Image: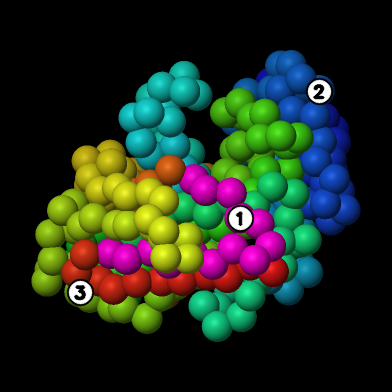
Amino acid sequence: MLDGSRRLAAADLLWAAERDRVAIAPLTETFPDIDVVDSYEIQLINIRRRLEAGATVYGHKVGLSSEVMQKMMGVDEPDYGHLLSTMVYSEDEPIDTAQFCYPRIEVEIGYVLGETLPGKDCTEADVLRATEYIVPSIELIDSRIVDWRIGLADTIADNASSAGVILGAGRIEPDKVDIGAISAVLYQGDEEIARGEAAAVLGDPTRAVAWLARKVASFGVRLEAGHVILPGSCTRAVDARPGDVFRADFSDIGSVSVEFK
């Protein structure tokens, strides 16, 4: 475990890496005794800095929500990061890749909460009752760690590698669809490059949202009405480069697109 001064030093390194677009060595190398608690505290240091600069909490994202990714990281539960108002992008405007170190996209079902979720006792039924609608979404991820050479502590400290979110126009109430049965196809231009099922996210992404509500409660945080929750990707992550145009088509809930420059 790190003391407060070393947690702050790690947060400063990530802050500078994002500001200057210059990736850093893994924190797990620079601070070999870093643990998961340290990592969440480091994440929160930089989130508080953004909030003090005027950003607001837009929602949260779940990472490592597939069995494959958990095995890769040697963990048995997901992780999470914050989505801020400064991280929201539109389908109508190209995103400048120069803002990021190693941008990638992931295809996800977004949950938009109409009510605040319970904390440590949150169930999947609570999530479905509180969700106003689900929406097609693309998460923009990035790593401030050189060459995506991340361990668990690295990605958590780096806000779970989160960088942005794009929501599509489709809206559907959760009781009108079998969420776990939704499928998604990702296109780059006219070429299909990936496809997946919502069930890849813990069997049903609603489980990931309930897990998140319970997890953040231990840090005194609630998932509030109006928040957007990204439960994890239906497909593999795909690199984003200038000129790339992507579209994700979801069964039942429509599509979402993003263009990079």
- The one of 93 and 203 positioned closer to us in this rendering: 93
Instruction: Tell me if mark 3 has few (under 14), some (14-19) or many (20+) residues whose alpha carbon lies within 10 angstroms of its own.
Output: some
The answer to the question of whether label 3 and label 2 lie on touching residues, with beta carbons closer than 8 A, is no
**What residue is drawn where x is 74% and y is 28%?**
26
Q: Earlier in the sequence, mark 3 or mark 1?
A: 3
- Amino acid at dot 1: Ala
**How far, Cα to Cα, is label 2 from label 1?**
28 Å
**What residue is drawn where x is 42% and y is 65%?**
190
Q: Which residues are magenta?
A: 237-250
- The one of 39 and 251 positioned closer to us in this rendering: 251
Q: Earlier in the sequence, mark 3 or mark 2?
A: 2
Q: Is residue 43 visible?
A: no
- Amino acid at dot 2: Thr
Q: Secondary structure at mark 2?
A: helix
Counting from the top left corner in percent of width and height, residue 13 is at: 84, 40
Question: What label sits on residue 30 in the rendered view?
Answer: 2
Q: Secondary structure at mark 3?
A: loop
Question: What label sits on residue 240 in the rendered view?
Answer: 1
* Among the 4 quarters of the image, the one containing residue 260: bottom right
